[in-house]
Image: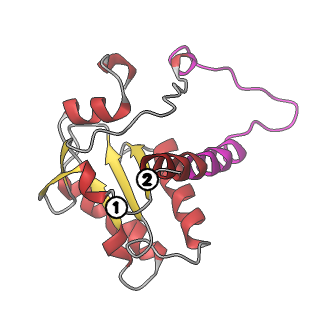
Amino acid sequence: MTQPARTIAIAIGLLVCAASAAAQIYAPPKGQTYTTSPILRKVGIDQKLGAQLPPDLPFADESGEPVVLGQYFGKPVVLALVYYQCPSLCNLALTGVLRSVKNLSMTAGDEYEIVAVSFDPRETPEIAAAKKQTYVKDYNRSNGARGWHFLTGPETSSKALAGHSDSSRI
């Protein structure tokens, strides 16, 4: 399996775990159903099998330093596109990633990297730093901060990463 394929496979696997956890938390009580809002009916998954992530996308890391996405590629990468100030599902996705990697014998920063990317261009490195601090503390491994990266950046970068040219879908 090639490096980009491994990266995507790991990311998908962990996000499925996170989605499963979210489904359990938000499942309706027995005998009741929830109706889906019109905006949620537009949410879907676009498979891009064999697609390569653009390594030259510019972002800023949690300390505000300029980075490009490809600098994290050399090891398998868990990639999570999230919204750091999200009150529900994005936090559940990151918590799902955290739960999954805490059970691995491998350590982030040594054998793989975790890269969370905000798709909201209004979010700042300060917000990313606070989010990183929370997750690294809960990860609780020596040098764990070395393997967790929380990026922010321009809308053009997050849209290119997400594979969308229509900002109404982000």
Establish if 52 lies above or below 149. above
Q: Secondary structure at mark 2?
A: helix
Q: Residue at x 57, y 56 (%)?
A: 96
Report if residue 88 is visible in the image. Answer: no
Does the magenta segment cover residue 23? Answer: yes
Determine the CA span between mark 2 and mark 1: 8 Å
Nearer to me, 99 or 69:
69
Q: Earlier in the sequence, mark 2 or mark 1?
A: 2
Mark on residue 74? 1
The magenta span reads 14-41
Mark on residue 3? 2
Mark on residue 26? none
Residue at the extreme bottom of the image, as rendered: 142
Establish if 145 lies above or below 169. below
Image quarter in which the C terminus is found: top left
Amino acid under disc 2:
Gln
User: Where residue 24 sits: x, y (%)?
Assistant: 72, 46
Residue at the extreme front of the image, as rendered: 1
Colour pattern: secondary structure
Q: Residue 135 is drawn in which quadrant?
A: bottom left
